[in-house]
Amino acid sequence: MTYDLLIIGGGASGLAAAVTAKSLGIGKIAVLERLPRVGKKILATGNGRCNLSHTPITAENFRGSVDVAPILAEFGDVKAFFETLGLYIRTDDAGRMYPHTMAATSVLDAFRLRMREDGVEEICDAQVDSLHFTKGLWHVKTTGVDYAAPYVIFAAGGFAAPKLGTDGSAWDLLKKLDIPIVSPNPNLCPVLSDARMLRQLKGLRVKGEITLYDQDDAVRTEIGEVQFTDKALSGICVFNLSGFIDTRRFEDYFLLFDPLPELGFDIESILYTLQGTRYGMNCEEMLSGLLPKPLVRLILKNADISPDYPCSELSGQEIRRLSISSRSLTFPVKGLAGFEQAQSTRGGVPGRALDAHLQVRSHPGLYVTGEAADVHADCGGYHLHWCWASGAAAASDIARKMG
């Protein structure tokens, strides 16, 4: 079966590529999806609300080896893109953009309704077994069917959230073509730390300031709610830091958590005030109105002060130690949570292997988009924006070549 364009993967970048390609006049298009339906991962994003982009958005929001700037510039206004599909967007106070319905189903419906109207074929339950080029056409073979087209967009995603269909197995198709790939790692995921420390904090959610250190150098600081499990630190602020950790040397990194950033340098005077206010109490009781008790116990332990020690007997030196301990809880990095808990993949086809429009330099007619390219970003809609933009960029370049 011969087409003008075949798209491997019916996720965010694949669907964006399909509607863009059709709008630019490309004729016969098919989206091959190995799951029973397209867009399963879209439905799970943003807790079912689909945080589909962010404003403002610039190249500085992205990391990896691909130059995203020209692709973002060509894509332009994400609101205009979706309005052409009949979907309207609302933006919250933090700049996160959602469908106006606040339902991810509306995003998927917008794509599927347009593809149905335009005659783009959705071929589901289509496990791609091989990809090769011969006699001027790319051949994409599934069980029992050989599809062919002069252009193929590889939009099969990465490794994150394998239960939603993205287990990275499709990358083997690229490896068999000798296309270089930056080794995949989880991105936007919990950071593993010392289980002995975390066990006593399990279940806590504490707002504060958290900084990732590479040995003595501060890499990045985030402010938000840190969630503690028995093995890891989690929460959006931690997810954003996970993408800066070199997985080859976890031992060089640690997280420094300040649960009282808003108090600034006043913390020592506040401790003296608490000492006077709760004069007849012990140290744990003295601090219980400032922080959750499990965190208080850890702070006291790090300051080498017994929880049962009478707060009235705290010396100036001990108050000083306590003030430092309360603002500098240190958690060594032991690793990253697996792809099952990750929101995206770090790694993929590197920039050196792709041209400015995401075509594989060594394999003309083959494009790599979305999570399969070596691009990653922060939480907040940036990743999905890259998926829309990269899919549209590949489709636009194909339309120019065909047209």
Image (spheres, grey):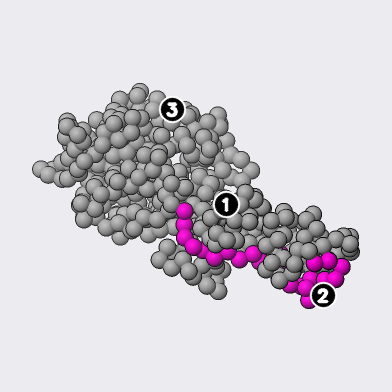
Which labelled disc corresponds to residue 229? 1
Q: Which residues are magenta?
A: 309-337
Label 1: element kind: loop
Disc 1 to disc 2, C-alpha distance: 34 Å
Amino acid tagged 1: Thr
Residue name at image x 72 percent, y 55 percent: 293
Q: Is residue 166 above or below residue 211?
A: above
Residue at image mark 3: 109
Amino acid tagged 2: Gly
Left or right of residue 41: residue 311: right
Label 2: element kind: helix
Quadrant (top left/top right/bottom left/bottom right) for the C terminus: top left
CA neighbours of label 1 inside 10 A, class few (<14), some (14 to 19), many (20+)? many
Q: Earlier in the sequence, mark 1 or mark 2?
A: 1
Q: In the image, which is nearer the foreground, mark 3 or mark 2?
A: 2
Q: Are marks 3 and 2 in contact (CB under 8 Å)?
A: no
Which labelled disc corresponds to residue 316? 2
Label 3: element kind: helix
Q: Residue 59, can we see it?
A: no
